[in-house]
Image (spheres, grey):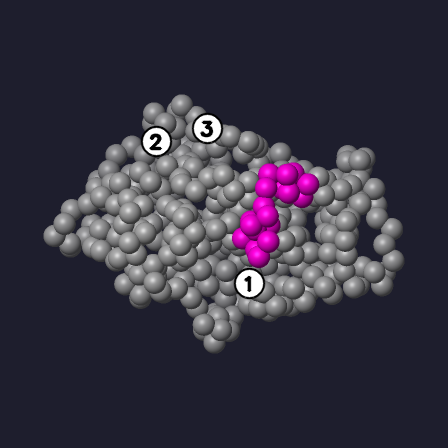
Amino acid sequence: MSSCTFSLVSIKPSKQFMSQNSFSLSNIRLEVISVSSSSSIKLQKSHMRAELTIMAPTTKQSVVFPELTKPGIPFFDLRLQEVVKRQSQNTHTFHIEDQARRKPGFHPSFLEESYERCRCICEEYAKSFYLGTMLMTEERRKAIWAIYVWCRRTDELVDGPNAVYMSSEVLDRWEKRLQDIFDGRPYDVLDAALTDTIFKFPLDIKPFRDMIEGMRMDTRKFRYQNFQELYLYCYYVAGTVGLMSVPIMGTSPESLISVKRIYDSALYLGIGNQLTNILRDVGEDAMRGRVYLPQDELAQFGLSDKDIFSRKVTERWREFMKEQITRARFYFNLAEEGASQLDKASRWPVFTIFQVWSSLLLYRNILDAIEENDYDNFTKRAYVGRTKKLLMLPLAYTRSLSTPTINFHCEQVA
């Protein structure tokens, strides 16, 4: 269930994370102080430190279940600051610093065919997403098509019809082929579109390599002991897409918020999308012997793999799912917060904000559908019909033009 969304080898949580339940949000550090019936955030701007008190929603059920790990952002040194720094350069400076790259000399008609094939694939397999790209400028939508096709082909290595032939050697060859794409030596006509895109926009290779690492995880890891492990997987297969997209969407040099904050919003949207995919596909993944749910949190609710494979919706399962949905919405709220500020402060083009809002609305509706199915994601697939998707587009466009609001209270402390 790699299912990259449009949506390092072994990295261990720091000792501080393990001992203090601390999380990192952009440049702000969150520390879970205690659990109470209220929620408050206190921000000290001098040290960019925040203290957070959270309470999980109480339920009226007669059975009392243990509380899950609170929604938070695990701290991993994914070295994303380097990606942000490199991708924030203008394209000319970026390529001067990377002398290994050779500018491809493609014939215009060949490039036209390359992008047209990417367009057809995007239109066929991601219809709603494709409609959104039509609001972009020609150069940007072509670039997004090229990235989408590469991500889809990467995902198909593990989840496609030829996945039975998957091996570590196949992924090694695919990563070498990626390096050739970045060096101006595409293997085929679809690769050529990405090579051309790389020379038009300051794209760093790391998010692409990290996505391949996510595919490696899918070939050798079928259980996730805790949310920290699951978060890392979600970053690899979906959060990376957000990092790839930011240079294409573009940011204003007059932005009033940090570029890192913009990347955070894109990353959190990808994480939320992948968590939603996981919750939607529990039944399908179980049929393949895969469980993409934190094992320790299942145990807290008295659940195990056996309960998932039995495909029975119990009261314990419903309560567990409520907490998992809350977590996914937590990441969507973070992405929405960033999108709202981007609308005003970062001054991204309207179509960029539209794309973010479209994704937010679509995936939130999938979570709503799981609830409407009484949390039966074993035998029922939560989906949003085509008509409803189309009806979301005007709402997404309206949201992209609306005045932003800040969803949390900040208190400056001397």
Judge depth for marks 2 and 1 and give the one in front: 2
Judge depth for marks 3 and 2 and give the one in front: 3
On screen, residue 5 versus residue 187, left or right, reads left
Q: Earlier in the sequence, mark 1 or mark 3?
A: 3
Residue 171 to residue 249: above or below: above
**Mark 3 in CB contact with mark 2 (< 8 angstroms):** no
Q: Residues within 10 Å of mark 2 (few under 14, many from 20)?
A: some
Label 3 vs label 2: CA separation?
14 Å
Q: Which residues lie in the magenta part?
A: 157-175
Residue 367 to residue 185: above or below: below
Residue 67 to residue 273: above or below: above
Question: Which residue carries the number 2 mark?
Answer: 21
- Specify the principal SS of the magenta part: helix
Q: Amino acid at mark 1?
A: Phe
Q: Earlier in the sequence, mark 2 or mark 1?
A: 2
Q: Amino acid at mark 3?
A: Lys
Say which quarter of the image contains residue 24: top left
Q: Is residue 278 shown in magenta?
A: no
SS of the residue under disc 1 = helix
Q: Name, please, the residue furthest toward the front.
A: 165
Q: Amino acid at mark 2?
A: Asn
* 282 or 348, nearer to the observer: 282
* 191 or 82, nearer to the observer: 191
Question: Which residue carries the number 3 mark?
Answer: 12
On screen, residue 158 versus residue 293, left or right, reads right
Place of residue 20 in the rendered image (x, y in percent of width and height, measured from the top left): 34, 27
Q: Is residue 163 shown in magenta?
A: yes
Question: Which residue carries the number 1 mark?
Answer: 354
Say which quarter of the image contains residue 89: top right
**Residue at point 32% right, 52% down?**
309
Say which quarter of the image contains residue 376: bottom left
